[in-house]
């Protein structure tokens, strides 16, 4: 498998992007944001494993590198173009039926809260084949089941090249479990995202 | 419902969950029909896999015939987590900005809705005692789940929660030591019985039960997140009608007033701590 190309021509239309990252994730998200062009406006959700701090400061940090509006969504906040959402620490971030976020304090899934799998699976139920899922660096296996589910619902799934990732077990687990559409460097992932729907929401 | 809001037909499982919620309401009066679907479905799926039930229709068949089983199932749908002084910034704002205003009241009534196992109700009781208001305040701590209320009224918690409780207490602006309010032993810690005197634990369902009258403060944290917006509106209306003019409303750190009916007016005491004051 391991396609090295993003055949974005094959992607019909994407209305939401969900990215999962863990160990080394903050740096790679900054890299990604710096490479997204001005016209990129597809609503994008990043589920980043963090210590369960009270306030993470991650949105402020990421804001410096992007034109997108970066925020931790409130419960029942609507999903909008031009926004880059970060899962708040210590909550699961779910996508609910009318394209709003719902938060949950359900038990951690595989020791993770937020759980990448949970966000991806709930988003796939709502966005079906108009969802793109992406798993980046991380030292566990969260996101693998989520990607598999997105694929089952007809969505498109990308994984960061494990050779490039700071921690390779999360991308490797994703590749082992899900039928990944492409395994790419973070630069190529950024290119791929910018080319979908011409980058427009 | 019939269809998802974006027009796609619901999946088989989604339809079965809709039917199950309707069945529980019709058969036993448990009303989860307006709960957020994303987390509700996950909890149903989890219960099914834990109990080796393959189809939600089979689960429904069982639950409408077996009340005891249903009570067990419903508990699994509502179990929540909480901590002593959870989100210390919330308690700091209460201490610094709400308490000074509450002092002018001869008697202070606080409704803590969805108190779960009681840690936050005791946190508030500690805070009130430290501020010298313990004797003239009463906290009505309610939950839908009678089992967690039993646990709450005991006031006994596992010792492994103690270190984060101490840290939270300190960060919330605590004036002495948390250990002055709890006793520790046998891998447990016990809330000082004196702190229980002004807490009334009682069962209350936000979906089907009525107003608690003339409260100076309503606290409901991380409960609304499990509700759809329509139900959030209904519950926020219930809180509004339970609050005195000038009363305070405290929500979870990621909850907002976006589902509040337009005609109600609140002022943010602290936007990020989610502490509001009724102003109309």
Image (cartoon, coloured by chain):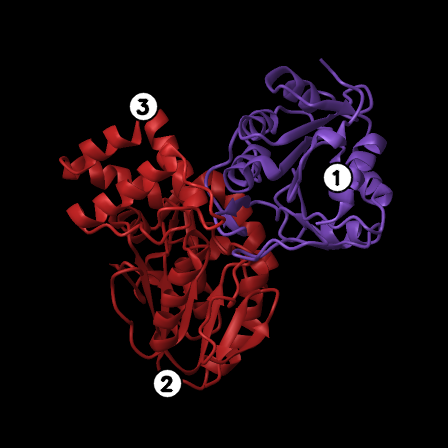
Mark 2 or mark 1, which is nearer to you?
Answer: 1
Q: Do tag 2 and tag 3 residues touch (Cβ < 8 Å)?
A: no
Badge number at residue A196: 1
Tell me the element at label 2: loop
Identity of the residue drawn at 31% across and 50% down? B32
Tell me the element at label 1: helix
Give the residue at mark 2.
Answer: B106
Q: Which of these two is toward me, B220 or A104?
A: A104
Pinpoint the chain carrying mark 2: B
- Residue B40, given in percent of the width and then of the height, sits at 39, 43
- Residue B109, given in percent of the width and then of the height, sits at 35, 75
Which picture quadrant has residue B13?
Answer: top left
Total marks shown come to 3
Identity of the residue drawn at 35% across and 81% down? B107
Question: Tell me, what hue is chain B?
Answer: red
Q: Residues within 10 Å of mark 1 (few under 14, many from 20)?
A: many
Identity of the residue drawn at 61% across and 58% down? B171
Mark 3 or mark 1, which is nearer to you?
Answer: 1
Q: CA distance from mark 3 to mark 1?
A: 38 Å
- Residue B94, given in percent of the width and then of the height, sits at 52, 70
Give the residue at mark 3.
Answer: B54
- Give the quadrant of the C terminus of chain B: bottom left
């Amino acid at each position: 498998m391991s396609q090295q190309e993003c055949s974005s021509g094959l992607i019909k239309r994407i209305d939401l992007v969900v990215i999962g990252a863990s160990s080394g994730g903050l740096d790679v998200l900054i890299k990604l944001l710096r490479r997204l062009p001005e016209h990129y406006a597809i609503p994008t959700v990043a589920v980043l494993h963090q210590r369960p701090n009270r306030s993470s400061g991650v949105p402020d940090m990421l804001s410096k590198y992007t034109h997108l509006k970066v925020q931790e969504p409130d419960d029942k906040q609507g999903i909008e173009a031009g926004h880059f959402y970060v899962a708040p620490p210590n909550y699961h971030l779910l996508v609910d039926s009318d394209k709003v976020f719902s938060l949950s304090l359900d038990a951690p899934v595989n020791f993770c809260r937020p759980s990448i799998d949970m966000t991806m699976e709930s988003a796939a139920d709502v966005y079906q084949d108009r969802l793109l899922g992406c798993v980046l660096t991380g030292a566990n296996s969260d996101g693998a089941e989520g990607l598999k589910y997105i694929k089952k619902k007809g969505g498109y799934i990308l994984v960061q090249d494990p050779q490039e990732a700071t921690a390779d077990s999360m991308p490797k687990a994703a590749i082992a479990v899900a039928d990944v559409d492409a395994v790419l460097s973070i630069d190529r992932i950024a290119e791929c995202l910018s080319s979908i729907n011409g980058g427009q929401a | 419902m019939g269809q998802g809001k974006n027009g796609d037909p619901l999946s088989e499982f989604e339809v079965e969950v809709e039917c199950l919620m309707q069945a529980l309401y019709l058969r036993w009066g448990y009303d989860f029909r307006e709960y957020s679907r994303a987390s509700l479905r996950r909890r149903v799926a989890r219960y099914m896999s834990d109990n080796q039930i393959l189809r939600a229709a089979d689960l429904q068949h069982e639950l409408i015939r077996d009340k005891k089983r249903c009570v067990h199932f419903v508990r699994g749908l509502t179990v929540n987590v909480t901590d002593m002084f959870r989100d210390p910034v919330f308690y700091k704002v209460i201490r610094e900005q709400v308490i000074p205003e509450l002092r002018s009241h001869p008697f202070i009534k606080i409704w803590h809705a969805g108190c779960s196992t009681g840690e936050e109700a005791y946190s508030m009781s500690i805070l009130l005692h430290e501020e010298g208001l313990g004797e003239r305040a009463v906290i009505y701590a309610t939950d839908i789940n009678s089992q967690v209320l039993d646990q709450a009224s005991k006031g006994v918690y596992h010792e492994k929660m103690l270190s984060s409780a101490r840290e939270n207490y300190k960060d919330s602006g605590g004036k002495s030591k948390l250990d002055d309010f709890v006793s520790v032993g046998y891998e447990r810690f016990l809330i000082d019985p004196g702190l229980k005197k002004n807490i009334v634990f009682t069962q209350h369902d936000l979906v089907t039960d009525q107003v608690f009258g003339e409260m100076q403060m309503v606290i409901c944290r991380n409960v609304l997140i499990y509700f759809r917006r329509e139900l959030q509106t209904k519950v926020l209306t219930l809180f509004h009608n339970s609050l005195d003019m000038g009363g305070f409303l405290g929500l979870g750190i990621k909850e907002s007033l976006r589902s509040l009916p337009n005609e109600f007016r609140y002022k943010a005491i602290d936007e990020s701590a989610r502490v509001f004051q009724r102003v109309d």
